[in-house]
Amino acid sequence: MSDIFALGIDIGGTNFRMGVVGGDGKIHSFTRTPSNVFSDGNAEEILLREIKVYLKQSGFEGRIKAAAAGIPATVSKDKKTVLSSPNLKAFDGVTISQDFETALGFSFYIDRDVNFLLQNDIAKLGLSGEKTVLGFYIGTGFGNAISFGGKVYSGCNGTAGELGHVPILGSTDVCTCGNVGCIETRCSGKALEELAAKHFPTDDIKKIFTLHGDSEIIREFIKDLSIPISTEINILDPDCCVIGGGVVDMCDFPKELLMDAIRMRVRKPYPEQTFNVIFTKHDQQSGVFGSGDFALNEYLSQIGNNITN
Ligand SMILES: [Zn+2]
């Protein structure tokens, strides 16, 4: 197993990260460069060129069995076409072609970045035996991923888990997705930035929970975050929930207040008595590990199927 390698890729709005994930669960040759490399030209061609250069330089040329890339977008169920990518416009509508995979010599998958973050958390937190695991990632937007029996649920079209885009009653705020009233317009890093600019314009936003965690404005923001989270807990009655993301990682983020608000809103007596939350912390490599781990598992299940067939 330790000599089987998959390529993990994480393309965010700012950073483009790559690394090789081994069957031993380790990441090799991790790199991080600016995502603006994709802003000038055909994203698929640039990606192919970048991967080839990376594999040559890292010494993994000819040793990769499969690859996957996470992007902040919705992706088709077959994990080949980017459906909607408002935060990474270069990839909007991009399809991974047969020629692309032939040029690399291995299968290549793309998926929503949060699906790979949940894949990372399930592996790192030892949750693979859990039946239903929900991931809530509050970063620039409100990310969500759902896993049933160790597999991330993708729905009919591949777009399941867009919890940030459930509508709020009566809201007329316009969302980056184009719809009106999405909960992400209130429950996200973007919304926190707007609150900070309006109410605490002279303070460093990084210190907002330290300086103003007790203020009614911030307490209401935290309580609002519990609405999408408790909604999905009430719908799916999960075995475990994972909460993370850039906002949650900020200094003095009031986790207890969030937990109290979730507890208040989940159905009694169940799932209130059993729901379980783990606060997770991601690093630069988490998305790369999740995508590489996914690609590795896809490869292993395919060779397993070939052997049994
Ligand atoms: Zn939306």
Image (spheres, rainbow, N blue to C red):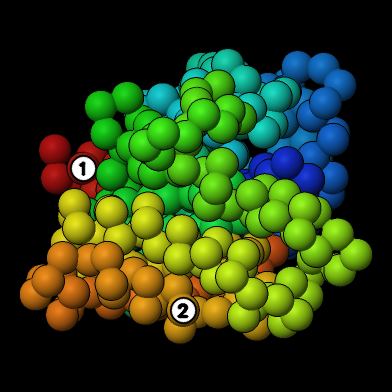
Query: Is 73 located above or below residue 232 in the figure?
Result: above
According to the image, label 1 marks what residue?
Answer: 305
* Residue 225 left/right relative to 201: left
Residue visible at 18% across and 52% down?
Answer: 235
* Residue 146 left/right relative to 246: left
User: What type is the residue that disc 1 sits on?
Assistant: Asn
Q: Residue furthest right?
A: 202
Element assignment for label 1: helix
Q: Of the residues tagged 2 and 1, which is closer to the observer?
A: 2
User: What type is the residue that disc 2 sits on?
Assistant: Leu
* Quadrant housing the C terminus: top left
* Residue 54 left/right relative to 186: right
| Of residues 136 and 105, the one drawn nearer to the viewer in this rendering | 136
Give percent across and percent down for residue 11: 67, 43
| Of residues 25 and 187, the one drawn nearer to the viewer in this rendering | 187
Mark 2 to mark 1: distance in Å?
47 Å
Give percent across and percent down for residue 116: 48, 52
Residue 4 appears in view: no
Residue visible at 78% across and 45% down?
Answer: 14
Give percent across and percent down for residue 124: 45, 74
Q: Earlier in the sequence, mark 2 or mark 1?
A: 2
According to the image, label 2 marks what residue?
Answer: 257
- Packing grade of label 2 (10 A; few <14, some 14-19, many >=20) is some
Tell me if label 2 and label 1 are in contact, CB under 8 Å: no
Give percent across and percent down for residue 50: 78, 36
